[in-house]
Image (tube, rainbow, N blue to C red):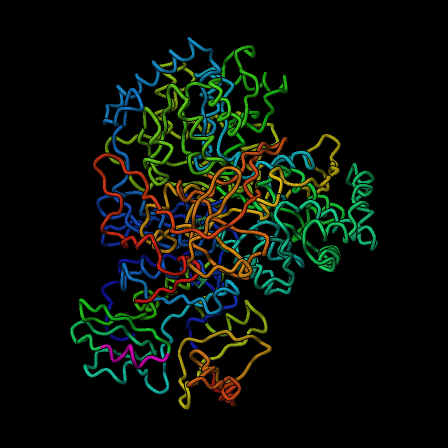
């Protein structure tokens, strides 16, 4: 090491936890170093926290300058991600001081007026007077609340409590409803507990890994290291996905089944397991109920029948059965590809049946997991934000559970509203004017809900609409009041990742003047609604203390988790009933589930076709998903220069057999509408299927085309399959820039400039090299 | 054995561009990424291939060799540095000389830029930003031993042929175990010259025995 940059040394603190990958110094138990705050001579500090985006919850340090502003990111050797980050995580810090941040409440009395900046008093008072007016005229349930699963768990607890105690309305739900509720429902039915059974680290121990309906490489990139780690140790990998994704490309077996046929496939796999005597009858006899019925049902799914339904070779079904059941330890991980269906719960149950019948439950390297999309998709529903759940995962229809919560909240049982409806159903109720006022917190249904025309109609029918957000989302442009709230790095709180490991996010900078925390806004509204005594929470920590107590003794027990313990350990998996309990990374190790009888309740699954029928006019399947550079509705990532440059616009992935060339304008038509995208012509997709990523608003919104059919049990929309056709179009629709708040720049000059949104040839993101 | 360096394993790459973003964040050329991400089999598969500077050693890095201003320094530990801004005249000779297509020229500033193996990080024991964050380990920083401990049986190559020239590099590439040949043909395969199919003639050119050449 000769010349140069010696002077740079002091910018990087020599933290033993920042070890290069591959040097064998990864710590087994992750964690925040004892000296939590590092400072160097330049006054830069590194604040340990986690990524705000997906359910992996990678650890990272935010770099904070002498003036207290976040200005960069440094990888962190946390147990979950061991320094690795995806492009979203690397660029996330740029939203903290982004010029698009809302810094004053926006208000207008009718949608015909433009927004004006208002004082907090004015905005809060107007909101409360509208709540009062609407509830007085049409009843308490005419006002609803929609929360989000990117909120810290403390805030999701507050959302649920606010709706029921301050608003006294049954209508509260959250956008996790669009994420993993099918898996949650299935896990609850089978195991009596709603979470993944194993930690990510178990993947490294498995012999056969089944990944179903999950584009791990793009949606949960940092999880890929566990997949490759397992393969380095000799595990085989089966990927079930209609597209040849980056992980499917290298799998031992890639089953490219037709969208909407998952349970037919897994039933047939189980059929082969039974037929070839590969089921673990000893395990089944000791630990399950319902096996006889399940075995009987799968008899009617011979591989030949399912191969026809799924459009895959029969041998692949047989091979999957032999690989999975023949492995000493096998694991199945799934995500939205099997969950986003009108039979989402059934699909998940069919996978659980396979794991159970082969005895792959509750052992190191053997089990199941669902890969959460949103950062707090897991924690977001555990504490009462979901329409049918009370804190601690209690059921709102269970009299004993209701009594327990009313006691903690200090209200009469008669005051606690019954169960409400799901997010999509609430929109239908808005259309029918049963819900006339709404507060949205941390969600963007104009991009994220299916069948945009219906969603727009529902929101337009609202007499009053308020949104909490830090950027002006597409949905917020419809509101009467927009409250400017903090981004994740300006507050502290906990999230539960896909392993149900609770991690703590730390505050890295003070919010800009004029911005308040969601906690503060909710408590102020509650105070003005006359429930101030029940919402005397100065900060997240105070809410967490109540949440701990409210969850004590339930399946979702957080009582033993404290902020201090989280900082010492780097994360604790619930249930954790006491402060000396280590948490529960792996479930069912003692062979008992959370049902009173301790058994796995196997459920009969019958396949049925998707809700949107194919016809001559609509012969293809349209399926949707993510791209690595963007997160959910894109309200955050579509503002970050590097991510916009990486993937500036959506595309439609089509098989070469349709005769299009790369970049051709292709119109995708469904029964809900039509839109034009550039073609990405690739053999990596089935000829009968087209794919559009969903992070953009109209006129290039995948969700203007998808169907608002719901799973009857989980009420998740059927995003992953609807009938479609494609045709040649004249030109490609423009990608709209994200809406901008008054007085702000859309794309700051300090960031990489936005590229031309209309690519001359291939759409960017999967085919454009970085050259200058 | 090789010292601590970057190993590139295209088989693991998921094309996520975390390396590209991370490179932009790195202090050595903050705001610009020095990584190329190529999609070698577009339309057929989602395969992707990251290229960082290969830090050529033998012959002396072609970019440094051709630089008329002596702006590209090679350090004692084999790192080919980005052009010295006080010397670089922006002539782009290095761009033309590099067989891997690595150096970039900022035409307006008349300055060359390239990956310098995050010298400001590696010199102090930290891994380069790209290899630190790469979610899949497609970019791995460490010694060959460490790589082989993590990935038993992995095969790597650190010399590449371009026509008659063999270039040996400081950065190594993982090659499929069943296709080990040495050195590895570099650049894109030439399949057609003046309408004549030469793919046969080019196949496996230069497969020779420099296996023991691993340092
Ligand atoms: S988006 Fe997910 S995978 Fe990417 S850095 Fe954030 S938590 Fe990690
Ligand atoms: S970060 Fe790794 S996996 Fe992602 S594109 Fe770069 S080399 Fe490939």
- Viewer can see residue A714: yes
Q: Is residue B126 left or right of residue A597?
A: left
| Residue at the spot 27% in from the left edge and 81% down from the top edge | B64
Residue A293, image quadrant:
top right
Magenta stretch holds residue A462: no
Picture quarter with ligand 2: bottom left
Q: Answer above or below: position of B215 versus A767.
A: below
- Please determine whether, in this image, residue A328 is positioned above or below residue A125: below
Res A375 visible: no
Displayed quadrant of residue A506: top left
Residue B137 location (% of width, % of height)? 48, 63
Question: Please, which residue is most extreme toward the top here?
Answer: A136
Residue A104 percent coordinates (x, y): 25, 30
Magenta region: B92-99
> Is A91 located above or below residue B180 in the figure?
above
Q: Is residue B14 left or right of residue A553?
A: left
């Amino acid at each position: 090491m000769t010349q140069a940059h010696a002077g740079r040394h002091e910018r990087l603190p020599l933290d033993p936890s920042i070890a290069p990958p591959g040097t064998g110094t990864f710590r087994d138990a992750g964690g925040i170093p004892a000296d939590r705050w590092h400072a160097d001579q330049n006054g830069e500090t590194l604040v340990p926290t986690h990524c705000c985006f997906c359910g992996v919850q990678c650890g990272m340090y935010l770099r904070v300058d002498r003036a207290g502003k976040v200005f960069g990111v440094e990888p962190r050797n946390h147990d979950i991600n061991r320094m690795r980050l995806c492009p979203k995580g690397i660029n996330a810090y740029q939203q903290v001081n982004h010029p698009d941040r809302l810094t004053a409440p926006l208000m207008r009395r009718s949608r015909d007026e433009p927004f004006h900046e208002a004082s907090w008093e004015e905005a809060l008072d107007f909101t409360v007077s509208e709540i009062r007016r609407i509830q007085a005229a049409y009843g308490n349930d005419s006002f609803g609340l929609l929360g989000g699963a990117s909120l810290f768990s403390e805030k999701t607890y507050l959302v649920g409590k606010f709706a029921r105690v301050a608003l006294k309305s049954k209508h509260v739900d959250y956008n996790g409803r669009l994420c993993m509720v099918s898996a949650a429902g299935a896990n609850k039915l089978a195991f009596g507990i709603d979470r993944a059974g194993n930690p990510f680290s178990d993947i490294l121990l498995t012999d056969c890994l089944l990944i179903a309906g999950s584009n791990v490489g793009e949606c949960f990139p940092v999880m890929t290291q566990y997949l490759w780690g397992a393969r380095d140790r000799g595990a085989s990998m089966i990927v079930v996905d209609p597209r040849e994704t980056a992980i499917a490309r290298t799998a031992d077996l890639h089953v490219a089944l037709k969208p909407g046929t998952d349970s037919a496939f897994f039933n047939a796999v189980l059929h082969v397991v039974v037929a070839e005597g590969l089921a673990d009858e000893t395990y089944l006899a000791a630990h399950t109920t319902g096996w006889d019925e399940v075995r009987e049902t799968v008899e009617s799914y011979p591989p030949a029948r399912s191969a026809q339904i799924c459009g895959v070779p029969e041998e692949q079904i047989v091979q999957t059965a032999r690989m999975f059941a023949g492995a000493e330890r096998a694991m199945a991980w799934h995500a939205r590809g099997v969950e986003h269906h009108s039979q989402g719960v059934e699909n998940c149950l069919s996978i659980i049946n396979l794991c159970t019948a082969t005895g792959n439950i509750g052992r190191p390297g053997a089990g199941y997991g669902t890969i959460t999309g949103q950062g707090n998709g897991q924690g977001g529903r555990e504490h009462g934000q979901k329409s049918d759940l009370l804190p601690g995962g209690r059921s709102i229809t269970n009299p004993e559970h209701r009594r327990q919560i009313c006691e903690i909240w200090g209200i009469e049982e008669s005051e606690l509203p019954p169960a409400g409806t799901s997010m999509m159903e609430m929109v239908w109720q808005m259309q029918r004017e049963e819900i006339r006022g709404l507060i949205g917190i941390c969600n963007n249904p104009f991009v994220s809900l299916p069948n945009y025309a219906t969603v727009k109609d529902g929101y337009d029918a609202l007499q009053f609409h308020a949104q909490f957000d830090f950027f002006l989302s597409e949905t917020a442009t419809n509101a009467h009041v927009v409250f400017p709230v903090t981004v994740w790095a300006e507050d502290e709180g906990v999230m539960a990742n896909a392993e149900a490991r609770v991690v703590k996010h730390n505050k890295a900078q003070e919010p800009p003047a004029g911005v308040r925390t969601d906690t503060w806004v909710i408590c102020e509204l509650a105070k003005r609604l006359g429930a101030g005594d029940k919402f005397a929470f100065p900060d997240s920590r105070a809410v967490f203390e109540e949440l701990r107590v409210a969850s004590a003794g339930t399946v979702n027990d957080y009582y033993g988790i404290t902020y201090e313990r989280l900082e010492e350990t780097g994360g604790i998996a619930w249930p954790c009933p006491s402060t000396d309990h280590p948490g529960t990374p792996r479930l069912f190790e003692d062979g008992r589930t959370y049902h009173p009888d301790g058994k796995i309740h196997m459920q009969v699954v019958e396949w049925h076709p998707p809700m949107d029928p194919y016809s001559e006019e609509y012969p293809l399947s349209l399926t949707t998903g993510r791209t690595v550079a963007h997160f959910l509705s894109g309200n955050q990532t579509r503002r970050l220069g590097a991510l916009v440059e990486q993937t500036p616009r959506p595309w439609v992935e089509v098989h070469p057999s349709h005769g299009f060339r790369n970049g051709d304008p292709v119109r995708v038509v469904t029964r809900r509408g039509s839109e034009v995208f550039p073609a990405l012509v690739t053999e990596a997709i089935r000829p009968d299927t087209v794919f559009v990523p969903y992070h953009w608003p109209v006129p290039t919104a995948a969700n203007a085309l998808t169907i608002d059919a719901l799973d009857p049990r989980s009420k998740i929309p059927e995003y992953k399959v609807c009938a479609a056709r494609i045709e040649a179009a004249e030109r490609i629709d423009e990608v709209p820039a994200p809406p901008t708040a008054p007085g702000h720049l859309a794309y700051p000059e300090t960031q990489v400039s936005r590229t031309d949104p209309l690519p001359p040839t291939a759409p960017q993101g999967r085919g454009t090299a970085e050259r200058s | 054995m090789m010292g601590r360096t970057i190993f590139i394993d295209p088989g693991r790459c998921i094309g996520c561009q975390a390396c590209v973003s991370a490179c932009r964040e790195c202090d050595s050329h903050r705001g610009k990424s020095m990584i190329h991400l190529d999609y070698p089999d577009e339309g057929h598969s989602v395969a992707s291939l990251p290229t960082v500077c290969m830090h050529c050693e033998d012959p002396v890095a072609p970019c440094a060799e051709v630089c008329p201003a002596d702006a590209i320094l090679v350090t004692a530990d084999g790192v080919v540095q980005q052009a010295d801004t006080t010397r670089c005249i922006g002539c782009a000779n290095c761009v033309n000389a590099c067989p891997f297509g690595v150096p970039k020229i900022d035409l307006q500033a008349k300055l060359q830029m390239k990956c310098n193996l995050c010298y400001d990080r590696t010199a102090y024991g930290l891994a380069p930003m790209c290899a630190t964050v790469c979610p899949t380990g497609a970019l791995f920083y460490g010694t060959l031993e460490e790589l082989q401990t993590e990935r038993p049986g992995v095969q790597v190559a650190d010399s590449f042929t371009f026509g008659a020239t063999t270039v040996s590099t400081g950065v190594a590439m993982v090659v499929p175990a069943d296709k080990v040949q040495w050195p590895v043909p570099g650049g894109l395969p030439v399949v057609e010259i003046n309408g004549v199919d030469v793919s046969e003639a080019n196949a496996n050119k230069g497969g020779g025995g420099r296996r023991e050449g691993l340092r």
